[in-house]
Amino acid sequence: MKETLNVQLLIEDIKKNDKLNEEEILNELSITKNELNDWLNLDVEINGEIYQKIKKTFDYSTSDLREFVKENEILEPWYSNVNLIQDNTNIDDIFKINKNLYDNIQKEDYSYYKNSTNPKYNDFVQNKILTLKNLRINTRKPIISFNGKTSSGKSTLINTILGEELLSHSKQPETSALIKIIHSKHKPSYFKENYVGVFQKKFNPNTKILSKAVVDPMLLHDKKYIDIYNGKIGSSNLIVDYGAHRGKYSMKKENTFTTIVVYHDAPILEIAELWDVPGSHSTSERNSMDDIIAETVRQDADIRFYLSDSNGFLSDDQPQLKHEIQASKIIDENNPLFNLFVIATKANSIKTDEDFNEVIFNRINELWNYSGENFEKEISENYNKDITKTLIVDRVFFFEKESKRKNRLLQKQLIESLELYYKKRKETLLSNFEKDTKIFNKMIDTEIINLKREVSSNDIEADARKEYEQFLKHKDETINDYKELVTSIETAAKKYKEDTSKQLKEVYKNKVNIDYILSEIERKNLKDNKKDKSNFMAGFTNDLQADFENIIKNQLDDFSKETNSKIDEIESKQVILKNSFDYKANALAGLASIASIGAFSWYFSTLGNLGGYIFVSKTIGQLASLGIKVGRTANIVRGVSALGGPVTIAANIAIFGAQAAVTVYKKSTWKSSLSKNIIKQLEKSNNDTNYLNYIINESDKLWDETIDSTNIEIFIKQIEEEEEKLKTKMKLREQSTEIINILKKEMNDLAEIKFDSNIEEYAK
């Protein structure tokens, strides 16, 4: 057992016997309110600096202070031995690949590669770099994120897993930055005895897309990042100073994202990273930034913990839990939700398990009512498997800091989830890496074959001139084809803009009326009580939102099919022309420059792995990392919306119905009164527009951005670059007497950047 000082009781004793208030105590100790709060959250060691300061200031003797000493059980970290999971999954191979890629990070920089006279060499290098980056990202340790409302116990659970009181905790909003906890063996050598680093980077406040401002700890071994990210290194005091709302430097710099990296030697960090994110349920402008930070970092989470206090378990967490379920990564379709943990904290406060099981079922039932009737269908389609209430109930676990017994099932399930994660990850890596590298190598082999054909040609100079002249002959026609594509896209976007608006209005008209809402009240046998009415309102608006999302999704699907069909149509004509210029690849590459704008954000997400084109169109590779499809159903619409992108249709419905549900109606007319109030709330002006107009405005913005973003100049630039490459190639063949040697060198240059298709080579 470890003895520590109970500062809370000691302060109360000083107030009582010395007749001092809190402010006077702070003055006597020469400390601030924040420092006192830190003392209250710390395990103050006997005979330590704080102990001695209190003892001296208020004339306590050692025997006086004995009554304020408490015995704490020494925390033991979870998973004292993680060798079992490493043996069962062979994850060392994945770690070796990841280490090899970081050790050779210079291969992700153009300067690493030689200059080649081959016109396609730079394109191949660019795509090799992209593939290496994707492989590095997909061999990192899984990320466990800790989410939940303020004071739900996130920091307490993390401390328990680590076996150390590392993070402070409070009933007030505590964490205001992203805190990444990783194994100390990854600590850069220049940190020396320090184990905490703070890194800050500016972001664009107009988009509030923060992902580019998040620091990758594995790059910190290069000391230049200290300057790039305005870094500071030190000990645990930096966590409070920069990472807590009450900290000295927390959120002091406007439009700046703070990442705190903490190095620790807890066993679980051998196989995972722990990410602590700000609590939800924030209302102030400062705390709304917490929600944006939390949403940003959750995109990377592989395993999600959502925590809720057992006292009032999930009583008002429906929006957050709904989002956790919708946003969880699909890693194993046969085991949906294995990476989602809903945790009831402070489990010792639960009276009986039987009673609490009923609470859990009731809360999940409320989640279903809140989320609307489309919710189960949507998530089942996402997971390609029936997702029922029972599956969610089965993902509820208990946590109690003081009870190993109550935490046993959570510990067991977490390690099993990590084991399954690694097995699936290795399967995915092996299949996708082999497939993608074969495509890449085949493209290089094709180019080498073309070069060999040139070498064996009787007239190399004439062949190069013919290729150049053939390109010039069809250049104007190719540009006109692309203009036709752009015109087709603009015409389609205008049509879909009009159709989307029309359909949104039609659905709203059919559902937001007294007769329809009354029929729904009757169909659901709604009771005249606050809880039922509140859930009905939330369910009604969520269903309405789902209908709107499906309309936009279907319109985006049709737009994507029409765009792809037009590209294929023009490509087939280009093939007939026998033009060496790859129209489809360059058309996609031209559009990829606007892949995050308007309807194109959806279009490129539907393409998945494009075979050879994934290597030509740079942005597609980022969207389809190692062949993993980006979007399913409405998730990408909602995902873009959450980050402030163009498809901002996920309005916060809660603002429309919170007060209406608690309104007292006459017994005889409560149904019609509730119906009228729902309509009133939806019609109520919010930022100068009602709900329907808000949705239509955002939909119009989506299509307008699509229309405005198409730019023929991008494609013309690619045509001109291709022309210049062919012209240079022709001149080289005309002028050089060493052309055979040059072509052979180009073949060697290309052969050198081919991948070894055996992924195990990267583990050496």
Image (cartoon, helix red, strand yellow):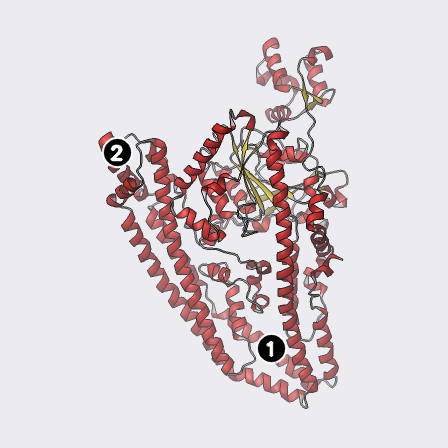
| SS of the residue under disc 2 | helix
Q: Is residue 723 left or right of residue 105?
A: left
| SS of the residue under disc 1 | helix
Q: Are marks 2 and 1 in contact (CB under 8 Å)?
A: no
Residue at x 60%, y 59% (from the top left corner): 626
Q: Is residue 438 left or right of residue 598?
A: right
**Can you give x and y, in whole percent of width and height, for residue 346 in the image?**
56, 28
Q: Label 2: which residue? A: 670
Front-most of residues 611 and 712: 611
Amino acid under label 1? Glu
Q: Label 1: which residue? A: 724
Q: Nearer the viewer, mark 2 or mark 1?
A: 2
Residue at x 54%, y 68% (from the top left corner): 589
Quadrant placement of the N terminus: top right
Quadrant placement of the C terminus: bottom right
**Can you give x and y, in whole percent of width and height, for residue 718 in the image?**
55, 72
Residue at x 67%, y 44% (from the top left corner): 231
Residue at x 61%, y 86% (from the top left corner): 465
Residue 85 quadrant? top right
Front-most of residues 458 and 226: 458
**Can you give x and y, in whole percent of width and height, for residue 175 in the image?**
57, 36
Residue 703 visible here? no
Amino acid under label 2? Trp
Residue 497 visible here? yes
**Can you give x and y, in whole percent of width and height, for residue 144 in the image?**
60, 43
Mark 2 crowd level (few <14, some 14–19, many ≥20, 10 Å Cα): some
Please say if 248 is above or below 477: above
Q: For the view shown, which residue lies furthest in the front direction?
A: 354
Q: Is residue 46 left or right of residue 380?
A: right
